[in-house]
Amino acid sequence: MLFLVRMDVQVPQHLPADTFEAIKAREKAYAEDLQRQGKWQALYRVVGEYANYSVFDVESNDELHALLSALPLFPYMKLHVTPLAKHPSSIR
């Protein structure tokens, strides 16, 4: 199942910089692992925002929820999930 996910990160001002850097390092490692597994198919930054659009290929809604809620930055994210279906005019 394919999903388009917009992730907007809103980091609290009071979060210490070193704590935030450690969270970002864990986030990067986790995201790279999911990409290697083929579950996180695409990752694109939104220009000028601390946000991204991502495409996930997972078995179920529950699997997507588990993957997203395990993101180290999850507590600081606003997520918008859109299920995707193959378009009849797509050549892929």
Image: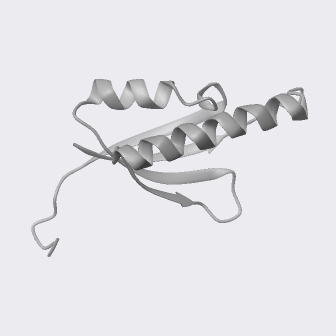
Q: Position of residue 55 (x, y in %)?
A: 38, 52
Q: Position of residue 80 (x, y in %)?
A: 46, 40
Quadrant location, the C terminus? bottom left
From what the image shows, is residue 21 above or below residue 65?
A: below
- Horizontal side of residue 49 vs 7, given as left or right: right
- Horizontal side of residue 7 vs 54, given as left or right: right
Residue 26 picture quarter = top right
From what the image shows, is residue 70 above or below residue 9?
A: above
Q: How many marks?
A: 0
Of 23 and 2, the residue lying toward us: 23
Q: Position of residue 86 (x, y in %)?
A: 16, 58
Residue 49 picture quarter = bottom right
Residue 27 picture quarter = top right
Quadrant location, the N terminus? top left
In the image, what residue occupies the spot 42% across and 30% down? Answer: 67
In the image, what residue occupies the spot 89% across and 35% down? Answer: 17
In the image, what residue occupies the spot 62% across and 29% down? Answer: 72
In the image, what residue occupies the spot 36% across and 44% down? Answer: 37
Q: How is the image coloured?
A: one colour
